[in-house]
Amino acid sequence: MHVCWRRGLIAVSGLLAGFCLGAEAVTFGESKTLALQIALDRRGFSCNTIDGQWGRKSQVALATYCALNGYAVPPTPESARDILFPAEPRLFRVAIVTRADCESLVRIPSTPEGKASLKAMGYETIQEMFAERGHLTEGALRRLNPGLPWPNPPVGSRVTIPDFSTVGKEPVASVLRVSLSRYEITAFDERGRLIGLFPCSIAADKNKLPPVGELQVMSIVPSPDYTYTPDRVAKGGRIVRRLFPPGPNNPVGMAWIGLTLQGYGIHGTPVPERIGRAESHGCFRLANWNAVRLRKMCETGTSVVIEK
């Protein structure tokens, strides 16, 4: 099945070059491009961070969704929203900044010693926290809520973010496919049907890329800690490892999916807006919300196919 939908994606890719944003809506929150990104994300076709801008990741998410469901790709994102998701319910919700939210904020130290001393590697600002809750870029969060004193609106502030509370139980993945050339992870159920697409980052050093072939999921850890090992040690010195506590600003984010290749895994990241680049140390990075979603779709023994 994955071959069929990929052929369909290739067939429609030529249409994507002509996509444009068109005239801006009356307000940012009324943008049909924004609505389309939310609708696709709800169905497991992630553009990574939602921003209301029509770029490559959004193109791939829409084309994949259309190819899977046998739809022709509409000529613009605005028409795609009108044709494919004309009655998408409750795009946004209003979230309240609580005292607990504010009290949970931390300052992330720059040194390994400082990071290891924290009780949790939480969010540094309310802006960072609520952008992640809405799968948004921080800029898009500010545009949705222009009247608030960012980055830290006070307790009781009402913040509009995309609503993902209606997303149900995640389907079970039988196979994950990691594409090193397309910077994406796709998930398939036992019938071979595509059930999720997630942009990812891969290793910057080609020597650290895992070999093409099949692995399995070996471990699944929600809210993992992280063992920091320095890249360099002074001559005659000794390696001092540090244990960083869990949290969204932990280097592996909010989920760890360990693979049967020592030291390799799929995990979250504290910088979701940088996903889609070759800059990791060898593992596969996802936005935290996508890592959590994929973690819920997997189980120990799930097949993971690394491909070019």
Image (cartoon, helix red, strand yellow):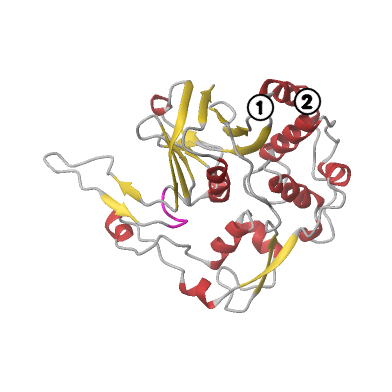
Q: Quadrant of the C terminus?
A: top right
Viewer-side label of 1, 2: 1
248 in magenta: yes
In the image as oriented, which residue stretches furthest toward the left?
Answer: 236
Which of the 4 image quarters holds residue 259?
Answer: top left
Looking at the picture, how far across and down is residue 205, in whole percent?
A: 41, 29
Residue 17 in view: no
In front of the other: 163 or 271:
163
Q: Amino acid at mark 2?
A: Gly
Looking at the picture, how far across and down is residue 159, in whole percent?
A: 66, 69
Left or right placement of residue 202 versus residue 97 in this view: left
Instruction: Report the residue at 70% width, 34% height from top.
Output: 60
Instruction: Report the residue at 44% width, 53% height from top.
Output: 223
Q: Which residue is mark 1?
A: 192
Q: Quadrant of the N terminus?
A: top right
Q: Which residues are magenta?
A: 247-251
Does 94 appear above or below 1? below
Alpha-carbon span between mark 1 and mark 2: 26 Å
Does 60 appear above or below 287? above
Q: Which mark is residue 204?
A: none
Q: Which residue is mark 2?
A: 14
188 in magenta: no
Left or right placement of residue 164 versus residue 289 in this view: right
**Count of numbered labels shown in the rendering:** 2
Instruction: Report the residue at 78% width, 52% height from top.
Output: 35
Residue 193 in view: yes
Instruction: Report the residue at 84% width, 32% height from top.
Output: 71
Q: Amino acid at mark 1?
A: Gly
User: The residue tagged with tag 1: helix, strand or loop?
Assistant: loop
